[in-house]
Image (cartoon, helix red, strand yellow):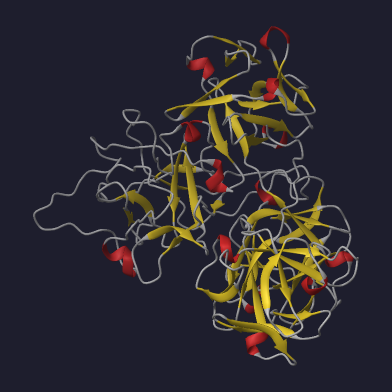
Amino acid sequence: MPTNGLHQVLRIQFGLVNDTDRYLTAEGFGFKVNASAPSLKRKQTWVLEPDPGQGSAVLLRSSHLGRYLSAEEDGRVACQAEQPGRDCRFLVLPQADGRWALQSEPHGRFFGGTEDQLSCFATAISPAELWTVHLAIHPQAHLLSVSRRRYVHLCPREDEMAADGDKPWGVDALLTLIFRSRRYCLKSCDSRYLRSDGCLVWEPEPRACYTLEFKAGKLAFKDCDGRYLAPVGPAGTLKAGRNTRPSKDELFDLEESHPQVVLVAANRRYVSVRQGVNVSANQDDELDHETFLMQIDQETKKCTFYSSTGGYWTLVTHGGIQATATQASANTMFEMEWRGRRVALKASNGRYVCMKKNGQLAAISDFVGKDEEFTLKLINRPILVLRGLDGFVCHRRGSNQLDTNRSVYDVFHLSFSDGAYQIRGARRAGWARGSGGRSGRWAGHRRQRRPVAQAAAADSGTRAATAACAATANAPRTSSSSSANAAAWPSAPGAASTCAAAPRACCAPTPTHRPGPRFGSTEAAPGPAHRALNRVRPAAARGLRVPLEGPAAVGGGGPQLSPNQSAPRTSQCPGTRVQEVALPCGWAG
């Protein structure tokens, strides 16, 4: 069952990178440690735990082995202790550049070295004893101010970020941590970066980069001038304050960001709880009461829907659906079935949820028809970081491929249109399958800025993807907790909305679109024919490769055709095959 704790504080896991860009590694054989790994994997992941004695010392535990790092008096280090002892206590000494120096508390020596020559015997700090912190958690999360107990969210009207939200509802509460040059940037949902003076900028300037510090399990963000981010003033504007040491005002919790969705019924109205406890499709506006937090049980792949009023959808007498449950149970679980661009929900009584004539939802149907189908749209992933079982999806440097087993990640942009999605990369190019089904190609047209490639999804043909949620749409959002209600979101340059990947034979011709004045707004846009792309096929979680093709790989125009090739017709022309894509929620964080 999904946990009832909707706001779960993330357990901070990280890697430690030495001066030669190698990660501290705990080996299972002999419980030895070294600094030889070039990337962050399971063996390179560590957890920082407070000292049980309530002192300033900390413990470093290997996530892979579950054992503690220890340093003996003669400088030998190992990761063998199952229970923390005296030699496991370290002091974290943050340096001016944000790196850490680890000092053995009982022996006063510093831990460092290269390759397999690690020791804790240095009497002074040199570059070999400095470590960079690289977070190993999913970078898309919510940020909670410890002192104010308020969530940080984007305020478009004031052009700032503020810690004044009672709950992390809507797309404006999404933050993405970007790791650049040993520092972190805070990226808002509209792809802007928070600068230390509180302004939002489009480029990760030096003043928009921060080093991380940990205190009592909380996070602090230190800017290049040695000051810390904190909510300032009555509005809680997030900017660097005057303190050069983190206090409670400068501490934050990272909380997991669950998918938040809206559903549109056959009457083209939003499913809502605005009218009370009954769940009904009777609203024309897409606000907080029409937004539901979705959690998926990893074992059964069934999902729950939690409303902004504080209740789960639950099955009641005579098949009715009400948002009154305070805890997840069998009656709050729904099985999701993908039917082309639509979804059908089956309740715990074995019947499908349908829309009655008055708009109310009830699980009373034995078969799926028009009234049992809904359009599902994720609203809190306008930008997306993808992670599989083996690592993050990232573009390979100097190559035209994507890998799914990397320790670093790329940020992708999504476009939505009528239940279908397109994944676009930094070059404004979409995903497409290449030959063999295990690789694909980027396709794009920088001049037109209307990529036409389709998106690939992991395990989209499996039961896991049947219960998965679709990738997000960057639709306009207005949060009641924001001081900028009903504000229009700025348009993303070059945003496009095309379809992408669903069950075979479910495709239909779809016009190419370009963005309107607000996120998610689309209108038809004419243009030259683009190269037709192969069908998208799910690839294995390990080693997915998507090569770039044509001038888009080097920053030129669209894909080129040989003299003997005829230009294939796009969705503007007859005969185009279009597909949909459903992304498992595990990939979206």
Task: Please say if 444 is above or below 519.
Answer: below
Seen in the image, is 427 located left or right of residue 488? left
Task: Please say if 423 is above or below 212.
Answer: above
Q: Position of residue 153 (x, y in %)?
A: 73, 54
Q: Is residue 518 visible?
A: no
Q: Is residue 55 visible?
A: yes
Q: Position of residue 4 (x, y in %)?
A: 76, 35
The single residue placed furthest to the top in the displayed view is 318
The residue drawn where x is 18% and y is 57% is 561
Task: Please say if 487 is above or below 115.
Answer: above
Residue 399, located in which quarter of the rendered image? Answer: bottom left
The single residue placed furthest to the front in the displayed view is 30
Q: Nearer the viewer, residue 125 or 499?
A: 125
The single residue placed furthest to the left in the displayed view is 564
Q: Position of residue 302 (x, y in %)?
A: 59, 29
Q: Quadrant of the N terminus?
A: top right
Q: Position of residue 33 (x, y in %)?
A: 61, 73
Q: Nearer the viewer, residue 161 or 515?
A: 161
The single residue placed furthest to the right in the displayed view is 54
- The count of marks equals 0
Q: Nearer the viewer, residue 383 or 515?
A: 383
Q: Nearer the viewer, residue 46 or 195?
A: 46
Seen in the image, is 581 located left or right of residue 105? left
Task: Please say if 359 is above or below 394.
Answer: above
